[in-house]
Amino acid sequence: MNKVYFKKAQPVVYQTLSNALKNQRVANAYLFHGPKGSSKLETAILFAQSIVCEHVDVDGFACQECESCKRIENEDSLDYMIVSNDRIKKKDIVDLQAFFESTSAGKQNARIYILDHYDKATSDASNSLLKFLEEPSEGIYGILIADEKSNVLPTIQSRCQSIHFKPESCKHLLLENTMEENAKMLADSGYTYDKAIELLALPDFEELKQIAFEYIENASSFAQIEKMQTSVFVNKSDRMNKDWIQLWIQWILFYVKNNKVNLPLENKVKLYSILVENMDMLYRPVDLGLFMDKLYYDIRKAVIK
Ligand SMILES: [Zn+2]
């Protein structure tokens, strides 16, 4: 994560975490919460690095360069675990506990876990985690991440230090890296700065943007659907992944919202709600091939005048 950006975008979070690190008062559990697009996950990773890094900066944050930092970045450490399932289940928490128990024998060093999308965890998972949080072991630190704090059980909330992230728009900074339209789409879609930069660096970013435009202009045509199936989101190909599909949907949403698609209002409204609903569906475990086929047909129905 870009620390200069972090300090500017989330000054309160920056200060709070900096104080904890500098005064060695890191809590056993944190709940990072705030709207989509705020850099909660990126900050959690930086914070985890900062706990183990031996070359921290004046504010107590990790160097992001040393071996300990790299190990966390690459998820290649026996003292660190990140669970980023769409829906955290009891088994994930049990595995997490087992992982730390099996790797921590006789160890003095800090062990850290991050639970992403915690607001979508099952209640069984929360009950297991609760026991873990009630008897905090020395040197184990947890960071839970949630868009919606209210979806996290109050008993879990009360055992975590709550860190609120404010909405972030990275558009301004993205303009240093890309053109207006790309910056606006990525920022409005709620991508974090880091994620947006990662996507912009992909060689076919511009191509996918074109594909989305061409598709939505011709979404009622079966030939267009076939083209998508056979040359864009081909089953088992590299592009058939949630990141790409999400980006593709975001581009279509962007075109609809910014009136770049020529449709009567009624069709636009229908199309919009299909896209938003399906974006949510993507967070669940789905068969991507079937998901896309259904989406093409739903969109086709919505755009037929
Ligand atoms: Zn470091």
Image: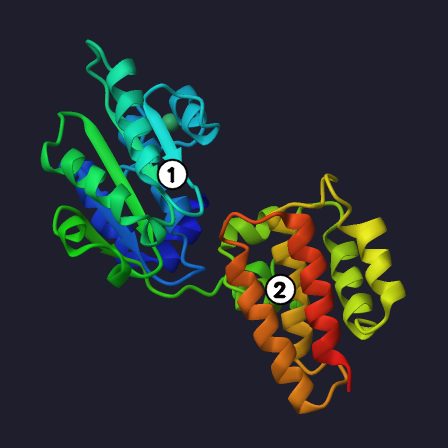
Tell me the amino acid under the disc marked 2: Gln
**Where residue 214 sits: x, y (%)?**
82, 67
Q: Which mark is residue 45?
A: 1
Tell me the crowding category of disc 2: few under 14, some 14 to 19, or many 20 or more residues within 10 angstroms, Cα based.
Answer: many
- Please state which amino acid type lies under the numbered disc 1: Ile
* Percent of width and height locating residue 226: 85, 58
**257 vs 93, nearest the viewer:** 93
Q: Secondary structure at mark 1?
A: helix
Pick the residue in front: 293 or 64. Answer: 293
Quadrant (top left, top right, bottom left, bottom right) of the N terminus? top left
Decide if residue 187 is on the left or right side of residue 303: left
Q: Residue at x 73, y 67 (%)?
A: 297
Along the line of sight, the residue nearer the viewer: 146 or 53: 146
Q: Position of residue 190 (x, y in %)?
A: 50, 63
Q: Quadrant of residue 138?
A: top left
User: Between disc 1 and disc 2, whose residue precedes?
Assistant: 1
Q: CA distance from mark 1 to mark 2?
A: 26 Å
- Return the residue at label 2: 250
Q: Is residue 245 above or below residue 139?
A: below
Q: Is residue 128 left or right of residue 46?
A: left
Percent x, y of residue 252: 68, 69
**Relative height, residue 231 to residue 182 (above, below):** above
Residue 178 visible in rendering: no
Task: Please state which of the two labelled residues, at mark 1 or mark 2, is closer to the viewer.
Answer: 2
User: Can you say whether 83 is above or below 68 in the image?
Assistant: below
Q: Is residue 23 left or right of residue 149?
A: left
